Amino acid sequence: MSFLANKNEKTVKLIIYITTIAVCALVVVLNQKWLPHPDVFPSFIYKLPMVNAFLNGTCCVLLLCSLVAIKQKNILLHKRLNLTAFTLSALFLLSYVTAHYFIPDTKYGDLNHDGIMSADESALVSGSKPFYIILLLSHIFLAVAVLPMILISFYYGLTDQRDKHRKLVRYSYPVWLYVTVTGVVVYILISPYYNYQ
């Protein structure tokens, strides 16, 4: 029985790693605009970054509530909150790739939205841009790194492998929480420079 469980776990982990690579590849392809996209698209597309920030913020609150629930040994509520956060994160991913597929790149500090950073624009954000870049890069890198950890944590939780779940969640939970918080902060910092059409 143990052999079958181990084989099943290896299969699940392989699927999780393949899924992670596929998601990362999709994000890169769409973000780099390697696929042709229409010149005209629905105006709601420009609302997606705000929707993404809302989804990240909601996930953050759900993750904090989930921590409280498990501290109070309310496993059912903990599970429901995490499943809801996971569902919202999946919606975030769909919204994120859709937004990055359609919306032109936004440069931090580009006040006139022409896609070119003038000397005056660069000077205005010279003090805050390094902070923004570090925050953005840490957000992106950790979002990629935490995805397989979250999926494996869910697998352990849903299959009632509590010891493995606890050990992995010690790392995946704070990283996931950081990603949700920084997602909101990144949106707040970049939103003045979006070219809403």
Image: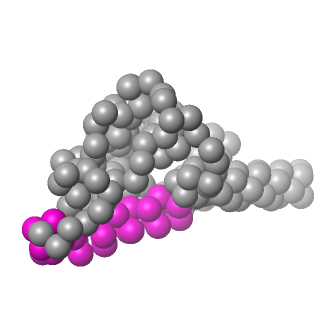
Res. 157 visible in picture: no
Q: Nearer the viewer, residue 23 or 2?
A: 23
Residue 78 sits in quarter? top left
73 vs 15: above or below: above
- Residue 21 placement, left or right of 108: right
Q: For the image shown, how many numbered marks are present on the structure?
A: 0
Res. 109 visible in picture: yes
Residue located 40% across and 53% down the image: 105
Residue located 20% across and 68% down the image: 118
Q: Nearer the viewer, residue 123 or 143?
A: 123
Please check the rendered image and state whether residue 180 is part of the magenta-colored stretch, yes or no.
Answer: no
By what rule are the colours in the image chosen? one colour
Residue 120: x percent and y percent?
Answer: 12, 69
102 vs 6: above or below: above
150 vs 94: above or below: below
Residue 174: x percent and y percent?
Answer: 38, 60
Residue 19: x percent and y percent?
Answer: 70, 51
- Residue 116 placement, left or right of 83: left
Magenta portion: prevailing SS class:
helix
Residue located 17% across and 73% down the image: 119
- Residue 151 placement, left or right of 46: right
Q: Which residues are magenta?
A: 121-148
Residue located 64% across and 48% down the image: 35
Residue 197 sits in quarter? top left
Residue 32: x percent and y percent?
Answer: 55, 58
Q: Nearer the viewer, residue 142 or 60?
A: 142
Residue 52 sits in quarter? top left
